[in-house]
Image (cartoon, rainbow, N blue to C red):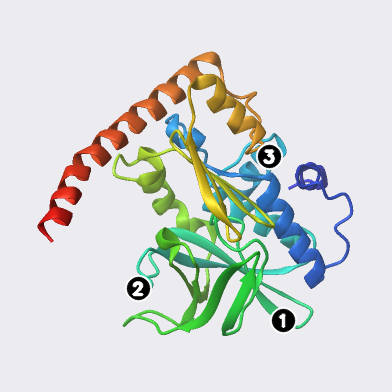
């Protein structure tokens, strides 16, 4: 990649002089990445998933786009290496079950060594830690959220690794294997996640943007604000105008690549999925009431 590409990437992050590799510099880079480049699956929703080659992701981010873990951490790893950091990519897995030791390769995770210490670095979880965490066992707090890092006892036939425990139910545990991985190791999984009708990335629009106090989350038409110190707020977006204003304003997504036809198709898909979700939720409500009355 050319230096100009990285200059544009850093400009998107709001960083003009990243300096020599340091723990402070690494922390600043991850914070900026989470604040300014949203986790989003807009192109997957439109049926045109971008590849995960890091150079492609760097160009997309420089142009105001977002991506999911393979794009976000893939490009971030390339940027960190360009700046002189020692980066290792790992096969990872995200689990809602805090007891799960599975590493299914559906997440790309990074570790970075700088200043004699190693850190768990992740710009691709959506609602993960705002700053890197020390790659050593312990409990850590960021912005009122509590995390824990533990050594991963591997399943039979797998190598050792690490686990990150988070306070978020759908993201209760993230596992990684120590062994280094390459972009090629994620290509097949990316194809399934970005094209299969059974994939959650194909079924549901999702955007995340983190800051020091919490995170903004858009799932379908429901916009939420999650913070440790305040109650979670959520509201249903009223229509396409508000929807696209939120994409651009809250999540910083440049919409210049979306034609009018794209916008209509995206809104129609999101609205249909939202209607199906409401119907499913309403169908379950009488069952829950009946179970409550029976008890």
Viewed as shown, does residue 9 lie left or right of 213? right
Give residue 117's mark: 1
Whether 215 is drawn above or below 168: the answer is above
Quadrant location of residue 74? bottom right
**Residue drawn at (69%, 57%) of the image:** 212
Quarter of the C terminus within the rendering: bottom left
Helix, strand or loop for disc 3: helix
Q: CA distance from mark 1 to mark 3?
A: 31 Å
Identify the residue position indicated by label 2 in the image.
Answer: 100
Q: Are marks 2 and 3 in contact (CB under 8 Å)?
A: no
Comparing marks 1 and 3, which lies closer to the viewer? 1
Pointer 2 or 3: first along the chain: 3
Residue 49 in view here: no
Helix, strand or loop for disc 2: loop
**Residue drawn at (41%, 85%) of the image:** 153
**Residue drawn at (72%, 81%) of the image:** 117
Comparing marks 1 and 2, which lies closer to the viewer? 2
Residue 50 appears at what percent x and percent y?
Answer: 52, 38
Quadrant location of residue 120? bottom right
Pointer 1 or 2: first along the chain: 2
Most extreme residue toward the top, as rendered? Answer: 260
Residue 33 appears at what percent x and percent y?
Answer: 69, 52
Question: Which of the two residues, 289 or 182, is positioned nearer the viewer here?
Answer: 289
Whether 147 is drawn above or below 74: the answer is below
Identify the residue position indicated by label 3 in the image.
Answer: 59
| Residues packed near mark 1 inside 10 Å, few (<14), some (14 to 19) or many (20 plus) | few
Residue 235 in view here: yes
């Amino acid at each position: 990649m050319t230096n100009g590409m990285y200059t544009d990437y850093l400009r998107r992050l709001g960083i003009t002089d990243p300096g020599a590799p340091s723990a402070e510099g690494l922390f600043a880079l991850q914070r900026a990445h989470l604040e300014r480049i949203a986790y989003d699956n807009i192109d997957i929703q439109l049926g045109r998933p971008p590849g995960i080659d890091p150079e492609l992701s760097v160009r997309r981010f420089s142009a105001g786009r977002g991506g999911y873990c393979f794009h976000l951490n893939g490009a971030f790893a390339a940027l960190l290496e360009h700046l002189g950091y020692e980066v290792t990519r790992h096969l990872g897995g995200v689990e809602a079950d805090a007891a799960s030791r599975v590493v299914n390769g559906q997440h790309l995770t990074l570790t970075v060594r700088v200043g004699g210490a190693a850190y768990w670095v992740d710009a691709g979880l959506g609602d993960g830690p705002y700053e890197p965490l020390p790659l050593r066992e312990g409990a850590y707090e960021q912005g009122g959220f509590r995390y824990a890092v533990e050594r991963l006892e591997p399943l039979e036939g797998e190598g050792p690794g690490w686990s990150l425990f988070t306070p978020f139910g759908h993201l209760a545990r993230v596992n990684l294997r120590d062994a280094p991985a390459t972009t090629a190791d994620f290509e097949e999984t990316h194809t399934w996640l970005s094209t299969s009708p059974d994939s959650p990335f194909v079924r549901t629009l999702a955007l995340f943007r983190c800051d020091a106090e919490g995170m903004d989350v858009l799932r379908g038409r429901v916009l939420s604000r999650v913070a440790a110190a305040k109650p979670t707020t959520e509201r249903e977006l009223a229509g396409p105008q508000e929807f696209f204003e939120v994409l651009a304003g809250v999540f910083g997504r440049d919409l210049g690549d979306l034609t009018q036809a794209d916008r209509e198709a995206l809104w129609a898909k999101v609205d249909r999925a939202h209607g199906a979700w409401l119907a499913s939720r309403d169908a379950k409500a009488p069952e829950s009431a009946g179970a409550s009355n029976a008890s």
